Image (spheres, rainbow, N blue to C red):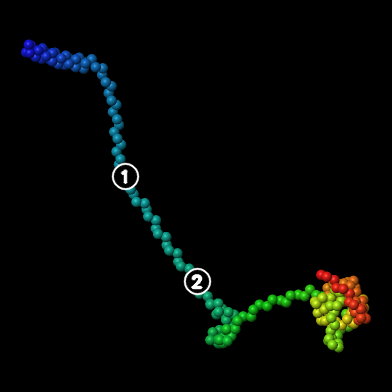
Amino acid sequence: MTAFAIEVALLLAVAFAAALAIGYRFGRKHRPPQPARPELPPAPVMVETPRVPAASKPAPEPEPPILIAPGPAPQQDLFARLGITDMNAVPPLDEDEEDVPAPAPTRPAPRSRRRPPESLPGVRPPALDAPEGEGADDLKQLRGIGPQNEQRLNEIGIFHLRQIAEWTPEEAAWVGSYLAFPGRIEREDWMGQAKAIIAGGAPAPRRKR
C-alpha cells in the first residue's frame, strides 16, 4: 500500500511538471508583442574651452606731486609790512610788560533819566551853600516830603522851612519838575505848610502810604 501511494505521487508530480512546461510554451507563442522602447538621445558631452586671458590694461601713470612754495611766516610777514627786515633789530619785551594783564572792558555809565536843571520849566529858587544857624531844618515835617525828597532838596541848597515858605509859583513849578512830580507841591501846599510851622502852628498831618 505504501509503494502504491508513492508511485501515484510520483505520477502526479510528473504530470504537473509536464503541464507547466506545456503551458509555458503555449503562453509564449500566444503572448502579444511588446512595443519597442524609444531610444534616448545620447547625453551631451561637456567640453571645456580654454580661457583666453583678457588683455591687461596698462597701469595709470602716477600724478606728479603738487609742490606748494612755503610762504613767509605770519610774524615775518607782519615785520615785512612794517618795513623791518632785520629780525634781530626788534627789541624783546620786558618781563614786566609780558605779565601786565589786559585792561578789563569798562561798561558805559548808565544814562540818567533826570532832566538837566537848565531844561526844567519855571525858575530855580535861591539856594544856600550850607545850612544856617544850628543846622538844617527837618523838612520831613511837611506832608509830601520823605527822606529821599529831603535829601534831594538839600542837594539843590534847600535846608530850611523859610526857604520853602518864600517860593513863588514859578519856583515851586521848577522844584516839582526837579523832583519828578510836577503839580504835587501846589496840591499839597508846601509853602502854606512851611508858613504855618514857622508861625508856631502844628504841622499838617502826614498821609499814610
Q: Is residue 55 left or right of residue 79?
A: left
Q: Is there any visible trace of residue 117 in the rendered image?
A: no
| Quarter of the image with the C terminus in it | bottom right
Provide the residue designation for mark 1. 49
- Which quarter of the picture shows residue 182? bottom right
- Which quarter of the picture shows residue 197? bottom right
Q: Residue furthest bottom?
A: 133
Residue 147 place in picture, x, y as percent: 80, 77
Q: Is residue 39 left or right of residue 88?
A: left
Say if 148 sits above or below 40 in the image.
Answer: below
Camera-side residue: 12 or 200?
Answer: 200
Report how far apart the C-alphas of labels 1 and 2 lie in the structure. Answer: 56 Å
Provide the residue designation for mark 2. 68
- Which quarter of the picture shows residue 78? bottom right
Q: Which residue is found at the position 37% from the left and 55% from the top?
A: 56
Q: Amino acid at mark 2?
A: Ile
Q: Which residue is found at the position 26% from the left and 20% from the top?
A: 34
Camera-side residue: 50 or 149?
Answer: 149
Say if 16 sits above or below 172 in the image.
Answer: above
